[in-house]
Amino acid sequence: MPISSRFFLRSIAGSALTLAAIAGAQTAAPAAPAQAAAPAAAAPAAAPSPLTTPAVTGPLSWLPPAIFDAGPLGKIAANGIVTGFGRWQDNPVPGDNTGQAALSNGQIFVQKADGKVQYFIQAGAYTLPALATPFLPTDKTVSDFYGPVPVAFVKLQAGKTTQLLLGALPTLMGAESTFTFQNMNIERGLLWNQENAVNRGIQLNQTLGKYFTASLSWNDGYYSNRYSWLSGSLTYTKGPHTLIFAGMGNAGQTKYQTAATPVQNNSTMYALIYTYTKGAWIVQPYYQYSNVPTNPAVGVADGASTNGGALLVSRAFKHGFSLPGRVEYITTSGSNAAGSVNLLFGPGSAGTSVTLTPTIQKAGFFVRSDLSWVHASSYTSGDVFGKIGTNPNQARAVAEIGFIFGDNIAK
């Protein structure tokens, strides 16, 4: 196949800014403060502020939530999004098409973000488009990956600086998040394809002094339902600067594989991510390393590793227009002669990608487009693009149009 084993499982088998959201701060951010009571019955209530969950990277901006009185459940906040997606590409692989279209998101987010006991529920339909992977219809994505409720957790505010989370959680790993609307670009990149996205387990968040926050999680890694993974992140934030170190690894081993649980489920991974955010600019370089060790017991006759780096930049202009871009390079070790596990375009291969995403947003309405190019090098014939997997290049043009719903729901 013209894709890595990770790509294969993401697609053919059925197919992770706020600054701290780079390492899964969807769940690591401190709880939103409780809303102040109105000083007098005649005084209008203050408009709610946008919530940090789900995290949305610039240039898209989340709307303040609609607040509903749920009686004994207290006041809950709700947001929603509906987006449509269309894609054209050259050199499609067998089973894929030159053009596709789908509902890319039809989701609602319900949460209680104050008090000692909080919760977050994300439900609906979604797609997970990524570079160098074939298109998977929305219904197949939902059924083969994380179901109609992909993220849902309870958060216990154990102290002023301590949180405990339990449920289906966004990963702590990586600079790009799971769903299209969360990221600078519509399609996730080559480095994202090595990462996990959603895991089930328990997570502890702790603020350490003025500048540091830490998260530690025991979970099922690549959605394996085998609770043998340990992951964590340490974040330093001062002014416009954020630096995150994230790591994760499997303390056990398993042969279990599905679309959401690839061979990387037996791996270790580390990332170092820096972000500068000031004014109209977001600048984010990061480095990522992963290793799938030799383990014949789980079908890995010869292990391999990846080394990759990326630079994501977004510049906002007037009238709601922004221009994000992403450049990536990733290499893999191993060889065909040694029977090494395939993590990209064949053992020992490398990949380069360039993506531009012109975006315009007016209130809750937005339109944006990805223009991308992927180039494979040192690849194995049959493991890249085109009808017989021998073309090292693929270009794509992607469009996404959508509506973000929030406080306007109740008006």
Image: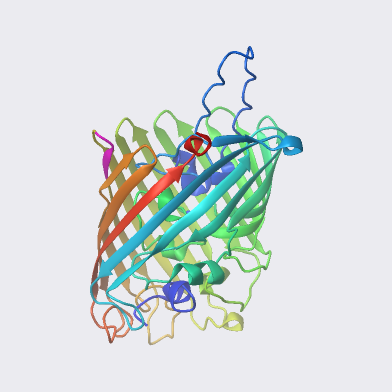
Quarter of the figure with the N terminus: bottom left
- 351 sits left or right of 70 in the view: left
- 49 sits left or right of 284 in the view: right
Quadrant in the picture for residue 347: bottom left
Q: In terms of depth relative to the viewer, which is nearer, 85 or 53?
A: 85
Q: Does the magenta stretch include residue 201?
A: no
Whole-percent x, y for residue 9 in the image: 48, 75
Q: In this view, does 88 lie above or below 105?
A: below
Q: Can residue 70 be seen in this view?
A: yes
- Residue at 55%, 70% (x, y): give it: 143
Count of picture labels: 0
- Residue at 36%, 79% (x, y): give it: 346
Q: Does the magenta stretch include residue 321?
A: yes
Q: What stretch is highlighted in magenta?
A: 319-323
Q: In terms of depth relative to the viewer, which is nearer, 90 or 381?
A: 90
Q: Is residue 119 above or below residue 71?
A: below
- 230 sits left or right of 407 in the view: right
- As drawn, the residue found furthest toward the front would be 411
Q: In terms of depth relative to the viewer, which is nearer, 37 or 118?
A: 37
Type of colouring: rainbow
- As drawn, the residue found furthest toward the right would be 72
Q: Is residue 10 above or below residue 19?
A: below
Whole-percent x, y for residue 386 in the image: 26, 81
Whole-percent x, y for residue 5 in the image: 44, 76
Q: Is residue 292 visible?
A: no
Q: Main secondary structure of the magenta part?
A: strand
Whole-percent x, y for residue 107 in the image: 51, 53
Quadrant in the picture for residue 376: bottom left
- 168 sits left or right of 174 in the view: right
